[in-house]
Image: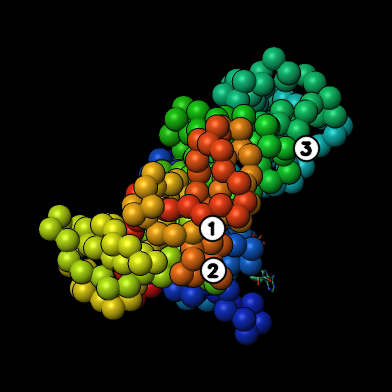
């Protein structure tokens, strides 16, 4: 397995810049998700790493070896990269084992060795019992596991996965998420996983690179992205994040904390150390951070708009009285009696002041 590093990589199609000086260091054996909205350049980045596209500026390294720079590119078949796409085409006329061993056959590996490595790769994804089946007789999830085994049989030093779960239903996705995690633990493969689904990225990755319009806007562990987003885009993209306008930001006695005014009530929230006092700021919170205050004096005034039943809890959609254009939500116990139109008092239990430059 190898580490991967992108150094100020830029790429344009015709005159449209798709990647702008992207730098990223993925450690050996790390599981990194590339997360971003449609069209932000995720697939282009993957294609550059795989060697299907040439970069315009910058460099890509696998370990110490430079595999791409302007005008110089190691071809895809020499990069030892395994790729699993969303559309995992399997050959319908070949058995599962032959599908998995096909690349080895092309590479001239002997039939005995081929079979051994195919069955070994299938065992890794718990599919060795179905080695002689036809792909037509498999479920969607089983086919995706075969695609994974096929990638694995070639013993790649890097695995690239492009929205591999996008075509699966929600239950199968959850099962496959577990599969990918287990697979990563077992093989120690360096994995780069593309998705626009933030919950999938949060569940799987050691670190997540959030992309927006051809740039990496933040590269951090899931917990840090959730608790300390660096910009409004990241704050909104992760964990149903909300951004509140706050005012009169002042120092708090506790390091890493400040006091702010949220719709007329003072609250202590988290901020970068050294955060300067400010007349106005933006606060990143999540529905779980907002709590119904028991007494009216506790929080800011709001009016309930509607309730969504979620089984384990109810989601209360509301508008602050002082900012009726802002639609927010919080989670409350499912047995809490609360009606649309009711007046409530809301406290910010936890929040993070977005850094000034964001
Ligand atoms: N071969 C190409 N020629 C011209 N433009 C391209 C080409 N490939 C991609 N683009 C453009 O580059 C931009 C980034 O595309 P890319 O596929 O990398 O985004 P993405 O983040 O993977 O999107 P999605 O999540 O929708 O797959 C888009 O505006 C796309 O239209």
Q: How dense is the environment of label 3, judged by Cα within 10 Å: few (below 14), some, or many (20 and up)?
A: many
- Residue found 49% across the figure and 70% down from its top: 323
Label 1 to label 3: alpha-carbon separation: 54 Å
182 vs 81, nearest the viewer: 182
Quarter of the picture for ligand 1? bottom right
Q: Nearer the viewer, mark 3 or mark 2?
A: 2
For the residue labelled by badge 2, is the local secondary structure a helix, a strand or a loop? loop
Mark 1 vs ligand 1: CB under 8 Å? no
Residue underneath mark 1 = 303
What kind of element bears circle 1?
strand
In this rendering, position of residue 295 left or right of residue 41: left
Q: Is residue 68 visible?
A: no
- Which is more N-terminal, label 2 or label 3? 3
Q: Which mark is residue 324?
A: 2
Question: In the depicted view, which residue is nearer to us: 144 or 52?
Answer: 144
> Which tag, 1 or 3, sits closer to the chain's start?
3
Residue ID for mark 3: 90
Give the residue displayed 79% in from the left and 26% down from the top.
138
The residue at the far left in this view is 253
Dot 2 crowding, Cα within 10 Å, few <14, some 14–19, many 20+: few
Q: Are marks 2 and 1 in contact (CB under 8 Å)?
A: yes
Label 3 residue SS: loop
Q: Quadrant of residue 318?
A: bottom right
Whole-percent x, y for residue 263 in the image = 39, 66
**In the picture shown, does residue 226 fall above or below 273?**
above
- Rendered residue at 76%/33% (across/down): 140
Foreground mark, 1 or 3, reads 1
In depth, the one of 253 and 127 nearer the eye is 253
Determine the residue located farthest toward the top in the rendered image.
Answer: 129
Q: Left or right: where does residue 170 sit relative to residue 40? A: right
């Amino acid at each position: 397995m190898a580490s991967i590093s992108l150094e100020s990589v830029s790429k344009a199609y015709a005159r449209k810049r798709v990647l702008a000086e992207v730098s990223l260091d993925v450690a050996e054996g790390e599981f990194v998700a590339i997360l971003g909205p449609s069209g932000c350049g995720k697939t282009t980045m993957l294609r550059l790493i795989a060697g299907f596209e040439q970069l315009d500026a910058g460099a890509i390294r696998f370990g110490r070896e430079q595999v791409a720079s302007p005008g110089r590119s190691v071809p895809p078949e020499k990069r030892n990269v395994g790729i699993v796409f969303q559309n995992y085409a399997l050959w319908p006329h070949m058995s599962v084992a032959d599908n998995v061993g096909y690349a080895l056959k092309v590479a001239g590996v002997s039939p005995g060795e081929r079979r051994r490595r195919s069955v070994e790769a299938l065992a890794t994804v718990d599919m060795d019992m179905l080695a002689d089946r036809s792909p037509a007789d498999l479920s969607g999830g089983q086919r995706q596991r075969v695609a994974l085994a096929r990638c694995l049989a070639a013993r790649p030093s890097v695995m690239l996965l492009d929205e591999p779960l996008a075509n699966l239903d929600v239950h199968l996705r959850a099962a496959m998420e577990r599969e990918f995690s287990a697979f990563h633990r077992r093989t120690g493969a360096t994995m780069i996983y593309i998705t626009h689904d933030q919950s999938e990225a949060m569940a799987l990755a050691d670190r997540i690179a959030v992309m927006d319009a051809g740039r990496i806007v933040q590269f951090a562990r899931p917990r840090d992205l959730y608790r300390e987003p660096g910009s409004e885009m990241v704050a909104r993209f992760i964990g149903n994040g909300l951004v509140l306008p706050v005012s009169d930001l002042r120092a708090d006695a506790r390091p890493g904390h400040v006091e702010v005014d949220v719709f007329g009530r003072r609250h202590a929230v988290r901020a970068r150390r050294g955060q300067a006092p400010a007349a106005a700021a933006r606060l990143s919170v999540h529905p779980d951070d907002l709590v119904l205050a028991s007494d009216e004096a506790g929080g800011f005034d709001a009016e309930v708009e509607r309730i969504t039943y979620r089984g384990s809890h109810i989601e209360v959609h509301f508008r602050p009285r002082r900012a009726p254009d802002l639609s927010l939500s919080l989670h409350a116990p499912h047995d809490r009696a609360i009606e649309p139109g009711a007046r409530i008092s809301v406290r910010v239990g936890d929040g993070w002041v977005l850094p000034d430059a964001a």
